[in-house]
Image (tube, grey):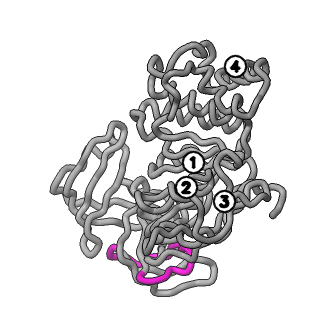
Amino acid sequence: MTADIALDIQRVSRRFGETVALDEVTLQVARGEFLTLLGPSGSGKTTLLRLIVGFDVPTGGSILLGGRDISRLTPADRSAGMVFQNYALFPHMTVADNVAYGLKLRKWPKERRRERVAEMLELVQLGGYQDRYPRQLSGGQQQRVALARALAYDPEIILMDEPLGALDRALRIEMEAVIRSIHRKLRATMIYVTHDQQEALALSDRIAIMRHGRLVDVGTPERLYEDPGSTFVASFFANANLVDAQLLERRGDGRARVRAVGSEFECRTSGPVLGRPKLALRRRSFRLAEPDGPSIPIRGRVAETLLFGDERQIVLDVPDAGRVVALMEARTSAVLGVGDDVQLHVPRDETVVVGEADPDQGA
């Protein structure tokens, strides 16, 4: 294992009787990287996190942290800090005592503990809160305390299991900014579990997308959004419309001649395009006016419009494609009404043909 790899997960499986929760997952996390495990409920992301922190042991494979096999060590014997969704703070302890808990277990001197607690509370923007109790804090403040406690003893890796799931949207956005700031300052290695695509986009250096206990794609947020490797990634992560496409001609440069939504055109392809091909149309790619560059016309009848503040969701019934959803600027799309026959446009360079099957597992 190279020196810049913090965590090396090698063909890790976890079975519960006949149920396969994880199926030979292989993944490497670089030092200082913020990696998000993203997937729907039951995809295996929390199971994988539990194996890394030591709450469970794998049925097969190995987990190396800093080059050391930790697969069967107790949580106390692993250098991993954990942040839970429900905070898991000790209600009878002050904020300072909660943050110092791990330091006390590791027998840090009292004065050094006091200095480190003050340092961590300043980092999470809670300086002056050291004498309060968890019941005196808001949900966002409690989560900051939990984060400070996980960071306090400088573990090799920080693990976060849906830490913002219990917060309202405004607090989640605020906490995302706090987490980003802390990661930039410390360059700590972090693994973050969520089912929220927007959180993953906002926070991650890379995202590992999981489904049915397998790793189906790993990449930067930009790559996964613009060039998804399968219909599942295009739909789940990029929130794209998927419409039937016919490959007329494949070329060696990753492009193809395609027939879809009543037109023939050239566009990009992603991966091997296994199974029946689909054209992925991202919701924010739709335009009311024809753009300057090559575009694909999308003709249909407006079935529904919904206002989302600065954006409006337009649902179209498109012949031979079914229902297609567009997100457009609210003011310019206000002219569209239910029952209208319209033609929208999608820039060709914002479309991609993907296959139905997931690519082979890999990092």
Using the image, determine if residue 113 lies above or below residue 71: above
> What whole-number distance in Å separates the C-alpha atoms at marks 1 and 4?
25 Å
Q: Who's the residue at 34% across and 73% down the image?
A: 261
Give yes or no for contact between labels 1 and 2 (Cβ–Cβ under 8 Å): yes
* Residue 204 locus on image (x, y percent): 60, 48
Instruction: Kindly identify the amino acid type of the residue bearing the numbered disc 1.
Output: Tyr
Q: What whole-number distance in Å separates the C-alpha atoms at marks 3 and 4?
A: 34 Å
**Are discs 3 and 1 less than 8 Å apart at CB?**
no
Q: Which residue is mark 1?
A: 192
Return the residue at label 4: 118
Quarter of the image for residue 291 reads bottom left
Q: Nearer the viewer, mark 2 or mark 3?
A: 3
Alpha carbon separation for disc pair 3 and 1: 22 Å
Q: Are marks 1 and 4 in contact (CB under 8 Å)?
A: no
Q: Secondary structure at mark 4?
A: helix
| Residue on which the image places disc 3 | 72
Of the residues under marks 2 and 3, which one precedes in the sequence? 2
Which residue type does callout 4 highlight?
A: Ala
**What's under tag 2, amino acid-wise?**
Leu
Of the two numbered discs 1 and 2 on the same chain, state the one appearing first in sequence: 2
Q: Residue furthest right?
A: 3
Residue 321, percent from left and from top = 29, 72
Q: Where does the image place residue 206, in percent across and percent down from the top left?
A: 62, 55
Mark 2, residue position: 37
Identify the disc placed on residue 27: none
Stretch in magenta: 261-276
- Mark 2 or mark 4, which has the lower sequence index? 2
